[in-house]
Image (cartoon, helix red, strand yellow):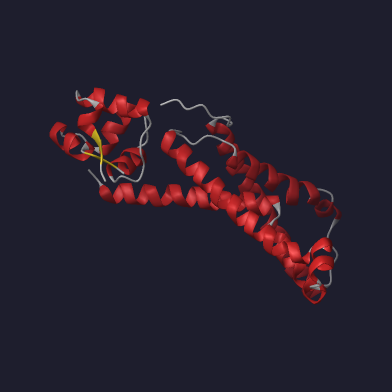
Amino acid sequence: MKTRTFLFPYWCQKTGWWLAAVSLIWWITIIIRALLDSENCVEMPDWMIQPTLFLSFILPSAALFLVCLSREKQEDEYIEYIRSRSVFVVAIIGFITALIYFPFTNIGVRLLEFSEYKTYMVYIQIFINPIILTLLYLIIFKGSLFINWIKSHNDGQ
Amino acid sequence: MMDNNLRVERAIKRISQAQLAEAIGVSRQTIFAIENNKFVPSTELALKLSAYFGKTVNELFWLTD
């Protein structure tokens, strides 16, 4: 059943997952390297520093972008419904987090005189990061699809 | 609220959720969600389902209090 969505084709999602796998391998390499470096006090080699920005940030972001903005294998109105519901949940979480975050902004601190809590600002700021919100959307969306898949599978005939 | 007898009609025709989903062109999860009243189908999908079972939309779907 055709739906009118402005999403990339399904193969883009596949590409996105491959890019995510490459990014994951890269991050594991970095973490292992960092652990080894901390023990041996060895500097990161040049071959690793050069592509760090691309592999560590741009590639996972591109992967996330492709996975989130691509159609499912069989995109229908129910999938669209789950997709829009997930976006709504993330929007609400983002909005509430932004409200909580407001007292710790420069304006909020001046208005509400909450300066003693300013150290927590960074932690809250992480949650209104667009990348984190997109990741949250992906978890909710794919999680809902998976739960539905399990339920319908158990329902059988 | 809306209810339906999609499951009954499917049992009469002796077809699985997957077979019905394939015939209509939707996913199996969609049929499961409609049968369990978790999702209200669009008019287009309701018409397709009723045409498949040879029933009217009112025979397949109805309003409840």
Front in this rendered view, residue B32 or A92: A92
Residue at the spot 42% in from the left edge and 38% down from the top edge = A78
Is residue B21 left or right of A35 when viewed as pictured?
left
Is residue A69 left or right of B8 when viewed as pictured?
right
* Rendered-image quadrant of the N terminus of chain A: top left
The residue positioned farthest toward the left in the image shown: B12
Residue at the spot 25% in from the left edge and 46% down from the top edge = A156
Expressed as whole percent of the image width and height from the top left, the position of residue A147 reads 40, 52
Residue B19 vs A50, above or below: the answer is above
Residue at the spot 37% in from the left edge and 32% down from the top edge = B26
Expressed as whole percent of the image width and height from the top left, the position of residue A17 reads 58, 43
Front in this rendered view, residue A54 or A105: A105
Front in this rendered view, residue A116 or B54: A116
* Rendered-image quadrant of the C terminus of chain A: top left
The residue positioned farthest toward the bottom in the image shown: A116
Q: Toward which corner of the image does residue A58 lie, by quadrant?
A: top right
Q: Toward which corner of the image does residue B55 lie, by quadrant?
A: top left
The total number of labels drawn is 0
Residue at the spot 25% in from the left edge and 43% down from the top edge = B64
Is residue A145 left or right of A57 when viewed as pictured?
left
Expressed as whole percent of the image width and height from the top left, the position of residue A4 reads 51, 26
